[in-house]
């Protein structure tokens, strides 16, 4: 087990052993929950029998789980999918390891019901401390529907993995691996600094800051190149497309919030020849915070390599 900012001492109760953060599983003899399956490796034991080591990841850390007598089933699992697992903690020669008791691939409609920001796979993030900041911001949202909105955008798809890894630009601000996440959090913190937004307005300010550049997950690559799509379409034009399913759900529960978010994410910057002028305080303040983050975090460093 590894230490992380999430590690804490907790009482080992049955209720808490259901969907714990992966940093907490050593507190339980047995736990169960849904997590990202990020890798699987077949091994051969001393007797020549095959077994598997799978890696599970959530927003707090990643762990290895040992699976026996599950060969054919594990071969059918999809990497970077959400699986349900029940596991026990075992000890061999004084060393602790996690052994799988039950493993199941979840249908999409079931995994969608279980989505939370905690399911973002930390193994893809080059700066785990930024994930703690992201979790803190999302956990502070007062509206469960707006919390679900940002989760729908970021969790359970390639968008979320790219969001953790992409730079925010190629040659200007935050032009390093993980720069998009760092920039988004910085914008959110700057936007909240004056503590002028309350309730749902504060929620919308946080969400708009976190996903204002979400289109860059499709226009910039992790390796620091412009994608083919990025050579044809500006990242701003992809925002509503990427968020379409999340907006469709939000429209059913908080339609006014959905409308306001659409405006904030698409209104024109000051001085633009085209586009709608920002007509809400959040939209105007977001543009100021975005510009401030970009101007104060300019770097000419080369793109870091992912371990």
Image (cartoon, rainbow, N blue to C red):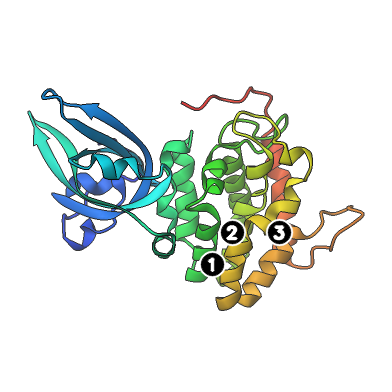
Decide which of tag 1 and tag 2 comes sooner along the chain: 1
In the rendered view, would you say 211 is above or below 78?
A: below
Q: Is disc 1 in contact with disc 2, using a CB cutoff of under 8 Å?
A: yes
The answer for how far apart the CA atoms under marks 3 and 2 are is 10 Å
Instruction: Answer few, some or many: residues within 10 Å of disc 1's Cα (few below 14, many 20 plus, some between 14 and 19).
Output: many
Residue ID for mark 1: 146
Whole-number angstrom distance, CA of label 1 to CA of label 2: 8 Å
The answer to whether any part of residue 105 appears in the image is yes
Please provide percent x and percent y for residue 28.
Answer: 16, 50
Q: SS class of the residue under badge 3?
A: helix
Q: Which residue is mark 2?
A: 207
Looking at the image, tell me whether mark 3 or mark 1 is earlier in sequence order: 1
> How far, Cα to Cα, is label 3 from label 1?
15 Å
- Residue 114 screen position, x and y as percent: 39, 62
Identified at 23% across, 47% down, the residue is 25
Q: Which residue is mark 3?
A: 265
Q: Residue at x 49, y 57 (%)?
A: 138
* Residue 264 vertical placement versus 61 (above, below): below
Q: Is residue 8 visible?
A: no
Q: Which residue sits furthest left?
A: 93
**Where in the figure is residue 35, as x and y percent of width and height?**
35, 50
**Contact (Cβ within 8 Å) of mark 3 with mark 2:** no
Q: In this rendering, would 175 be left or right of 59? A: right
Give residue 20's quadrant in the image.
Answer: bottom left
- Which residue shows up at 42% across the image and 37% down it? 123
Circle 2 Cα neighbour tier, 10 Å, few/some/many (<14 / 14–19 / ≥20): many
């Amino acid at each position: 087990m590894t230490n992380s900012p999430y590690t804490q001492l907790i009482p080992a109760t049955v209720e808490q052993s259901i969907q714990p953060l992966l940093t907490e599983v050593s507190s339980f003899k047995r736990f169960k929950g849904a997590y990202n399956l990020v890798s699987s490796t077949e091994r051969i034991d001393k007797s020549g029998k095959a077994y598997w080591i799978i890696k599970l990841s959530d927003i707090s850390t990643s762990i290895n789980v040992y699976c026996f007598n599950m060969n054919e089933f594990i071969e059918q699992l999809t990497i970077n999918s959400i699986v349900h697992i029940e596991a026990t903690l075992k000890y061999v020669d004084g060393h602790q390891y996690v052994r799988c008791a039950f493993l199941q691939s979840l249908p999409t409609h079931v995994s969608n019901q279980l989505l939370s920001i905690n399911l973002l796979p930390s193994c893809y993030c080059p700066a785990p401390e930024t994930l703690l900041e992201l979790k803190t911001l999302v956990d502070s949202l007062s509206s469960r529907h707006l919390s679900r909105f940002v989760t729908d955008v970021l969790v359970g798809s390639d968008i979320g993995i790219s969001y953790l890894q992409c730079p925010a630009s190629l040659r200007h601000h935050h032009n390093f691996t993980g720069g998009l996440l760092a920039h988004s959090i910085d914008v959110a913190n700057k936007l909240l600094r004056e503590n002028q937004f309350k309730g749902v307005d504060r929620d919308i300010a946080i969400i708009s800051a976190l996903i204002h550049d979400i289109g860059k997950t499709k226009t910039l690559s992790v390796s620091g190149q412009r994608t083919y799509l990025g050579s044809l379409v500006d990242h701003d034009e992809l925002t509503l497309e990427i968020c379409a399913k999340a907006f469709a759900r939000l429209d059913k529960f908080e339609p006014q919030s959905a409308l306001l978010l659409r405006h904030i994410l698409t209104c024109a910057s000051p001085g633009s020849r085209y586009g709608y002028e920002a007509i809400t305080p959040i939209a105007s303040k977001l543009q100021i915070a975005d510009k401030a983050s970009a101007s104060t975090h300019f770097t000419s460093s080369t793109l870091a390599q992912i371990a």
